[in-house]
Image (cartoon, grey):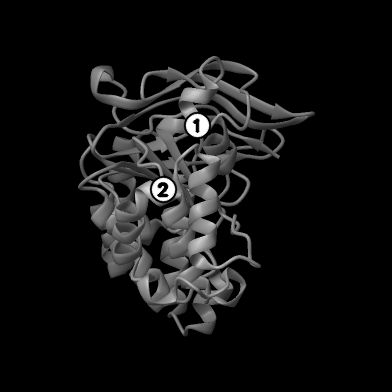
Amino acid sequence: MQASPAIAAVPAGAGEDAAVVIEGVDKHFGKVQALRSLSAHIHYGRLTGLVGPDGAGKTTLMRILTGLLVPNAGHVTLAGYDVVKDNDAIHVASGYMPQRFGLYEDLSVMENMRLYAQLRGMDADRNADLFAELLDFTRLGPFTKRLAGKLSGGMKQKLSLCCALIHEPEVLLLDEPTSALDPISTGKIEELITELKADYTVAIVTHNMQQAARVSDYTAFFLQEVAGQPAEPHGLNTEGMRRRKVPQDTIAALRQAYKVLYRDGLTLEDARVQLAEFASATPDVARLLEFLQGESRHGIVR
């Protein structure tokens, strides 16, 4: 499976206010091309949503941004640091919340926080005020002695968020922070993420276009091609929609909308024009069209 080429993620100009600059990045694993010719800017003081189906290369990009993976080609900077040459500085400038829980389940909430602080070279005892602030922000204050393994999914994500923020990074990278959560827990995490926009530059990976619309200032779409074939719509859970008794005509309209978005070589302007032709078919397509309004906010990742 190959991720399609490049990107027009968020506006590619105005580099001077870009917290993250990605230029011509390729990444492959053996014969699998995960990213190809990827270029984008993520701006300071904004929350950027990176939207795409499983296998589109979103997590690969996140790991490159944190210095965990080295691209095969191209150049990436985060907060002005080269992600390959300045790995130690990237470790300080970025906070990463991975998709899978990165917690020690046999340690308590507070013990996890202290451990992450120590891994960052911080004196946990001298940062008691910061700990208290994070615990208050995430509403975990009453649970500091509870083992991480005994927390609910939503509380684990809150603790993961605390650990990603423990060193007050310049750029916060969140990989599918609500993928395994129920709607109520998802809403609570989204509220926290929205509050973070006031103090941090945030990039959030999600497969959920509606979530990106709720929380993002800027949005980029990852599209895929398989074995050189034109891009196909992925990530639309039609079975789940049927279980929720979504009308068949609505499902059909959304599938058609996704085919427009995933069409190879499509520009954002072309997408808006074509979606407008059948936006009246269902309010869901109309909302998708509204979401895509404004070239300064959204792009299509190839």
Q: Which residue is mark 2?
A: 166
Q: Residue furthest right?
A: 30
Q: Residue furthest front?
A: 125
Assign the N terminus to one quadrant of the image.
top right
**274 or 142: nearer the eye?**
142
Residues at badges 1 and 2 in contact (C-beta under 8 Å)? no
> Horizontally, is 69 left or right of 238 in the view?
right
Choose the circle earlier in sequence order: 1 or 2.
1
Amino acid at circle 2: Ile
Q: Position of residue 121 (x, y in %)?
A: 50, 37
Numbered disc 2: secondary structure = loop
Residue at 24% over, 56% down: 195
Does residue 106 lie above or below 274 as drawn? below
Q: Which residue is mark 1?
A: 91
Cα separation, mark 1 vs mark 2, equals 12 Å
Amino acid at circle 1: His
> Horizontally, is 196 left or right of 5 in the view?
left
Does residue 3 lie above or below 39 as drawn? below
